[in-house]
Image: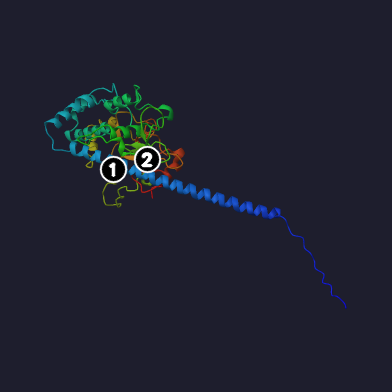
Amino acid sequence: MRHLRIHQSVQSTRSGFTIVELMMVVGILLFLIATSVFVVRNLGNTAREKATMSTITKINGLLTQRIDALRRASGANRNQTDLERLVSFRSTKLRRSTSDSTNIGLGAGASSVSTDVLEILVAKDLFRQYFPQVRNENASIDSLMDAVAGTSGAAGNLGSDGGRSVSAEYLYYFLTQHGVYGAAPLGEDNFLSTEVVDTDGDGLKEFVDSWGRPLRFYRWPTRLIKPDGVNVDRTTAGYLISSLPAEVISGTGQRDPLTIDPDDPKGLIQLDNQNLSGLLNPLFAASDSSTPYTLPQYATRDTYSIPLIVSAGQDSILGLYEPVDATNNGYLCHPDAANFDGLFDNITNHNQRAGGN
């Protein structure tokens, strides 16, 4: 009998992967890791943005309450006390020479300033006094902050961070420790420990964003509206203030709202200044952007302004000169052209989210 032989080919089994297959697996793993890191990082930044906006919204609400209380008090019907205050302001601040930071120095011409304009200037002075941004705007608050830090001159000192924390230190102090016209100071327990930190180690706490960096406070951000001191820049201002008053229709004869000082909607300062041959010019920041701001000047004349609280966002690039920088008009929130892109992810009390959209 013949037996059929079936020849079976025996194939050797592989014991591993080829180089190509290993490289593909590694590539996929690296892609998944990179994607996961990107997603987690974005989720983290989104959470920080929301937390920062929550902090800023809280601060803004308390700041607004204080401002409203001040305006109600200073806007009351004129009485003898108010008249005495105006006379005192004219004689002590306007008439004297610029021998210190509390005097403006118009000389004898100060007696010619109208009472209506004096009232506006007094209101501005009170606003500066109760909402200081740098040293020498309120001597009492300066001294109290120095006492907290245990060092004379600590308030307003540029310190180890070049002054980045100064305006946030003042903002924290006058909200939590200093009253204004019946609005009592707040307790520190209104804020989380992550919202208030002494980042520069000077003994003074400041408000911080969720990246642990100091917020900035600009009381009169008029150089954001008019970077050159004359022309309105709606686009730049819109990044940080998305609720800007609408532009008027050309040909209607109406003034652009961004050229109107909220304290002086009728333009009385400008009229008085014309009648007095420019006597009031030294009271306000110069219209020339290259001329540095000096205390105790007021903000850029005939310009819209609203107090601004700013976080530099996740990249920590502010895109503005610091609130303590008078030389570059940073005191009035002048954009920093060299770091302009930093504006786009900033978070403020007047934009809806990062980027001002």
10 to the left or right of 33: right
* Label 1 secondary element: helix
Upstream in the sequence, badge 1 or badge 2? 1
Q: How many residues crowd around disc 2 within 10 Å: few (fewer than 14), some, or many (20 or more)?
A: many
| Residue at the left extreme of this rendering | 80
- Could you tell me residue 187's position as x and y percent? 28, 35
Please give the count of numbered marks on the rendered protein: 2
Q: Residue at x 45, y 46 (%)?
A: 44
Does the rendering let one see residue 307? yes
Numbered label attached to residue 155: none
Q: CA distance from mark 1 to mark 2?
A: 14 Å
| Residue at the front extreme of this rendering | 1
- Could you tell me residue 311's position as x and y percent? 39, 40
In the figure, residue 265 lies in which quadrant?
Answer: top left
| Residue at the right extreme of this rendering | 1
Which of the pair 16/236 is nearer the observer? 16
Which of the pair 236/316 is nearer the observer? 316
Quadrant holding the N terminus:
bottom right
Which of the pair 334/323 is nearer the observer? 323
Numbered label attached to residue 310: 2
- Could you tell me residue 243's position as x and y percent? 32, 48
Numbered label attached to residue 61: 1
Q: Residue at x 54, y 51 (%)?
A: 35
Does the rendering let one see residue 305? no
Q: Residue at x 60, y 52 (%)?
A: 29
* Label 2 secondary element: strand
- Could you tell me residue 314's position as x and y percent? 45, 42
| Up/down of 78 relative to 30, above or below | above
> Do the numbered discs 1 and 2 sit on residues whose CB atoms are within 8 Å?
no
